[in-house]
Image: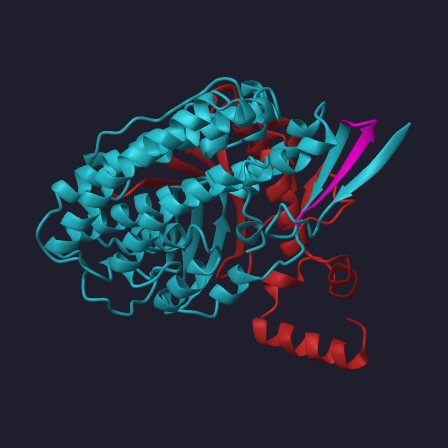
Chain colours: A cyan, B red
Amino acid sequence: MSYIVPIGPYHPALEEPVHARLITEGEVIKDAEVFVGYNHRGIEKLATERNAIQTLVLVERVCGICSHSHAFTYAMAVEKINGIEVPKRGDYIRVITAELERLHSHFLWLGIACHIIGHDSMFMHIWDERELVMDILEKLTGNRVNYAMVTIGGSRRDVSDELRREILDACDKLKAPLDRITEIALTDKTIALRTKGVGVLKREDALRLGAIGPHARASGVDIDVRRDAPYSAYGDFEFGVPVVDSGDVFARVVVRALECYESIKILRQALENLPEGPINLGNKLIKIKEGQAVARHEAPRGQLSHMVVGDGGLNNHRISVHVPSFKNTPTVPFMLRGNTVADAGLIIASIDPCFSCLDR
Amino acid sequence: MQQEYKRIDITKDQIVPIAEKMRKNGVYLVMIHAFLNKEGKMDISWDYAVDPAVESYHVVGETTVPSIGEIYDEAARWPERELNELFGLTFEGLDVSKRLFLPEDLLETQGKGQIMVTPLSELVEKNQTNKKEGSV
């Protein structure tokens, strides 16, 4: 006999509203549907009545986790329309903030994944280590969220030599805990039993549905905007793109843990080779020239794109923000099928969904 | 270093063949966007990640276009459903029987396509009037 099991829109395992409807037979999920749009905020509409500097503040509020990614991507689109060349040091500081953001986002997700499977000691251990990254972000930007590091034409805050050395020290300090976390993630029986073979998204499905970011890379799809379409200072750095083939929740854990090492690698290169010179072009209010551009950035959850249309005035004529969860959420029903109801919360959370981003 | 962005204007008939070609070549669909241009005409664009560039194919002046959901699956259907709600655009062949982002009561009282084409001040005023009348 079939039952419909509703999850959400408000659920303890989900910090933001989403509604999944599971069609089950016994404990097994036969089919599923996902519904979003419980808190649509109309941010794109608001942006049409704001200038470029005000919009940086606005788009940072699209998401509390990847706030820098939004400001970074929006700024790149406006700079493309206006033909603005960002000073090298400004680009490096943007990348440093972006990679610290990726580290804290991945640590956050790894902790949450452990919490959902009931491995709370691991959750607390990972979040404790995450505080090191949060402290550095606070020293660098003055904030733990909504960093306000980006301005049109560069970065807003410089990195002193003392802070540069401190972040390099933090990279050293992170190595041992990251090794320990990765080793536990790869070898712990509890994690393996709850994640291996669970919520599988096959490579062909990931490609067909347009999955992106770590979610796609855990299904064997080798994509990363930082490498495939280099922007800002990313072309200056060597880094790997971890790809795992199994497509299950375990693969998503492994990919994110390995990506932390690559972020540290990028951070080291950026900090050791931080160019001298200005960080921005004066933080001036500009008119957005007539024209349009799309900028893409590999945010912690995957490719983030901002389309900006300017009409020669101060305000945006139109912005269109497309977030990784917009691409990854439609894959959830495919991952749920054939799994048990008990794993549904974990499977939904395994894409690292951001419904706040989605309901921008 | 800035990413490359190419705008290519096409006709409505070219939307599906281009999508098929891109799909065959393994190109990711970045997104489908729309906006009203200075002349008040709808400008719809299909952005493809032809790395390292974004190729942006534009159709101007149309409000009914074919869906590419059969080619790009949910990667196309979600943005098409979003544009149907926000701009009232029709994507031929797309199932719009369920809402995506906007609440059903808003779609019922204000209709599709109100969000992006109505000035914000008018929307606020309309919402306040509706609240007074108890319809929202």
Depicted A198 relative to depicted A298: above or below: above
Q: Residue at x 28, y 41 (%)?
A: A231
Count of numbered marks? 0
Residue A20: in magenta span: yes
Residue lying at 36% horizontally and 50% vertically, measured from the top left: A131
Q: Which residue is farthest right?
A: A1
Q: Quadrant of residue B12?
A: top right
Residue A77: x %, y % from top left: 35, 51
For this rendering, which residue is in front, A38 or B60? A38
Q: Position of residue A121 (x, y in %)?
A: 49, 39
Q: Pick whichever, B60 or A319, lies toward us.
A: A319
Quadrant location of the N terminus of chain A in the rendered image: top right
Q: Is residue A34 left or right of residue A151?
A: right
Q: Quadrant of residue B69?
A: top right
Q: For the C terminus of chain A, which image quadrant?
A: bottom right
Q: Is there any visible trace of residue A152 in the rendered image? A: no
A76 left or right of A187?
A: left
Horizontal side of residue B36 vs A236, given as left or right: right
Q: Which residues are magenta?
A: A18-29
